[in-house]
Image (cartoon, coloured by chain):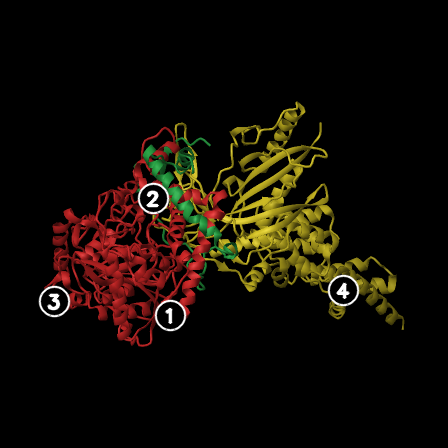
Amino acid sequence: MMYKVVIGLEVHCELKTKSKNFSSAPNEFTMTPNIHVSPVDLGLPGILPVVNEEACRKALKTAMALHCTNPDEIVFDRKNYFYPDLPKGYQITQVTKPMGIHGYLDILVHGERKRIFIHQLHLEEDTASLEHASTFSLIDYNRSGVPLIEIVTEPCIESAEEAVQFLEDLRDVFLFCEVSEAKSNYGQMRCDVNISLMKEGQKELGTKVEMKNINAFNAVKTAIEYEIQRQSEILDRGEKVIQETRRIDEDGKTYSMREKVDAIDYKYFIEPNIPKIPLSKEYLDAIRKEIPMLKLERFERYQEEYGLSEYDAGVLSADKKISDYFNTVIENSEDVSLALNFVTTSVLSTLNKLNITIDEFPVKATSIAELVNRVSLKKISFDHGKKILYKAIEEKKDPIDLINEQHLEQINDEEKLLTIINNVMNEHPEQVRQYVEDGNTFVYNFFVGQVMKTTNRQANPNISLQMIKEELERRKQNERK
Amino acid sequence: MDYKHSTIEQLNEAICTGKVKSEELFNEAMHLIEQYQEDYNAFVTIISKYKKYGQKDTLISGIPYALKDNISTSGILTTASSNILKDYIPVYDATIYKKLKQAGAVLVGKTTLDELAMGGTGTTAHTGIVRNPYDKQRLIGGSSAGSAAAVSLGIVPFAIGSDTGDSIRKPASFGGIVGFKPTYGRISRYGLFAFASSLDHIGCFTRNVRDAAIVTDILKGNDPNDMTTLPDEEVCYLDHLNDDIKGRKLFYIKEICEEKIYQDSDENVKKTIETFHQTVEKLKEAGFEVDEVSINKELLNAIYPTYMIISCAEATSNNANLTGIQFGPRQDGQDINEIMFRARTIGFSELIKRRFVLGSYILQKENQEKLFKNACRVRRMIVDKMNDLFKEYDGLILPASGTIAPEFTHTSKSEKLDPKATVLENHMAIANFGGFPSITLPMYYYKGLPVGINLTGRPREDKDVLNMAQKIEDVLQIKNKVAGDYDV
Amino acid sequence: MISKEKLKEYANKLMFDMNEEEYETLQNEFDIILKQMEWIEKIPNIKDVEPMTFPFPLKNACLRKDEVGDYLTVDEVLMNTKHQVRDQVKVPKVVE
């Protein structure tokens, strides 16, 4: 039988800040244990939390980017439970007033927009990390207190594919907003999956199975697919799915961790050591101004406004920095298709070839735009422009400086060209005579060659040829008179 | 010189003029500790070696003092008088300890408290009971029992305590000394082992109001490690102690002070109420205006349960870090839960466990609205009522307790809840609810044992409370007393 | 009245146990405090009052600038436990 799949995700993401959420110990990934720990992170008696403004800003910013409603004040709550990775015996989190509620993120599934509703986004602190040996475990408190946002979706995701697409796009939101590096291999982005199956037409949700702490996106995919299969088979047999928490093994199979007897009562209450901090409209507006255009908007804008192909739009919107670079080129260029050509063929291929990031790319976006403009105004030829660009990349120089240094700019000025042509013709009376008297048109190329030689190949060859023809003809007419 | 009866300023002058050395004062304190420790048990840890700290130009430089053993002192054992922390050596300093070191004060020891500061008797410390300097058969009150005893015995001219319900101001009453807790946030709590964070205050014990102002001037101030601290103020409390109080308006609560309520009570309570009314008359003569104000009796009856509910709820969470994993005695166990379970079962005494269960029950999802939130609502009603009265009045005066310090009984050890506990004995928690500055000073002696008077003022107006307290002290003329000055 | 079994369950969730007699005392204590709370519910319009979580509003409260400050050395982190391996706190194997 076919079942309707209902998936909700809880995504945790560590924020990139200099210090921790409630202490001033460094927030920096390290393999050396217990070197980034303050008394606060260790939960020593007498400690008090002091809230990091940057963590709040980044949580609010992400909430805004996800179209959430922000609270009127910052409030934190305590979530009370005992676990060896939680030194205080409670986690400071947000229940009363999360940084964002009721938001959404639009994703593209098979070219169609799907809106994933966000239930809430809140700011909390990460736990210490446990390393498991064969007979014992070790506690490293470096991660304790690292600012963490949790994003909870509504149960509106309907397939493994949608879930993974959402996670990828959500990671892009983190990256585009520059709130986190969101490296799942460092555990900076982790995900809990809630999944239930229901018969078509059924109204109430099926029994929910929870899968905790999945780091890699493809693991999310295989785990969901495995669960759909497993739960379908149970339902097909007419049996009931048990409400439980399951873990994923290396093959992507899930197995039972514990049955959910009753929900843990976390005894939430407002953290009394953190006074409520009002959020003014000005403060929130200033943060909102920092939110860049997100991936999907850029992707659509590139196609609609600039007429880029879906492929090019996809490539250029995938990475914020590349996209920003491209935007700068486009905004300063007269000719969009020429700019696109320069960025996709020259810039992107160089990044690939040299295996460098756009930050390391030696030529500024504004210089590319200037180069593009010179080509589009025919001050230099297309081929020449490309050659200059590659030379600039190779020598790590500004292409416009190169043009100026080597006087590489094309001579299009007809007056200037005429002077040069006249000089050349005066130096070669024999070749002029051949045309005037014998009508020998082979001398055209001779004179073009001479003009190019004298001008260090800067003369516009087409204009030069035309003018040489005219000048020779003029001299021929004069001779007849 | 008469160390035991000297004020801070007298000691400071003696040091500055070279009449006495700081080390000699320290040795004097050590001598007194040796003399009294066995009988009164005021200290958990005694700093036996003299060490000179910090600045020389403060009034407390070179002067001995004691810290309650729930204040974090790097490298010095800090137990909170609980078995669960009996071997804990902090690796950081409380903000106030830093300030006291910088001011040059000399720490002589860490004082005994009710386990984890949760208690009002001074009888629940893991190192045993603290006795009242005026009568060894009586308790001194808590939770800042050792600090109160140390000052009352004359061991130190000042000691630091913490106050969540009345933990400074009640033992001050029973010890015949001054106990002051300023406005919530005036003194940083960073490094104070939390009992109930929204009610916890740090304060001091001294033998006169002037010394309380001197010590508070040192301790106060905004602290980047405590978000709840108030901004710094450009005022020195000491400079304003003798401001004119003419026209200052005080009130007392009719439902607590009416003589007819206590017709059936024992002589002690009757005498306290009588003395209180006499004091009111004296204060009027001295220039205060004093009014009787009536407050809904039911609201007053709610003070104690409200205090219990809020403090137990916060306490159960605040002490969830005590598991013997990263600090404190580690117990054996097959698995991690057994280790934590055994550490806590062995480490906490019965009273503490009962309060934790109560606190946890209060916070349970199905009870939160009815118990915790309602208690928080009553808290607001009481505080709103007080703030309303503070629009007209500068302060509230009441007896700090109805009786002298009680004798040790079988029940006081476990401190079971007394349903008949009167408002008279529990009203001082009002100042914790609203963060009001509140001070207790000696009012009279009943059969040679002290009873205090309490003054509570507007939030942030610590200067005015100390100023008014100074005037009350001038009127009552009881100061610089040390146990033994009167024969029991 | 809350059963002793329930109280034991609550205590165990807080990671400790008590003896019979202590549970009995606790049971009585619960009785008293719950009775005292009962009339609070009867205060007119109590539900209209906003629960107070802080003694007074703090207008000056501000967030901390994101800067690294003082923190502990590894030795300080581990100072209060003998149970350590490879600069970490050792506990029996934690099974999730």
Mark in the foreground, 3 or 2: 3
Colour of chain C in the image: green
Give the residue drawn at x 56%, y 43%.
A11
Q: Give B328 or B314, whichever is nearer the viewer.
A: B314
Q: CA distance from mark 1 to mark 4?
A: 113 Å
SS assignment at label 1: loop
Is there one chain holding both mark 2 and mark 1? no
Mark in the foreground, 3 or 4: 3
Q: CA distance from mark 2 to mark 1?
A: 50 Å
- The tag on residue C77 is 2
- The tag on residue B18 is 3
Image quadrant occupied by the N terminus of chain A: top right
Q: Position of residue C3 (x, y in %)?
A: 42, 35
Is there one chain holding both mark 1 and mark 4? no
Q: CA distance from mark 1 to mark 3?
A: 46 Å
Horizontal side, residue A109 vs residue B55: left or right:
right
Q: Residues within 10 Å of mark 4 (few under 14, many from 20)?
A: few
Q: Which residue is mark 4?
A: A428
Mark in the foreground, 2 or 4: 2
Q: Position of residue B367 (x, y in %)?
A: 48, 44
Give the residue drawn at x 41%, y 50%.
B310
Colour of chain A in the image: yellow
Q: Residues within 10 Å of mark 1 (few under 14, many from 20)?
A: some
Report if the CB atoms under discs 2 and 4 are less than 8 Å apart. Answer: no
Colour of chain B in the image: red
Residue type at mark 4: give it: His
The chain to which mark 2 is attached is C
SS assignment at label 2: helix
Q: CA distance from mark 3 to mark 2?
A: 44 Å
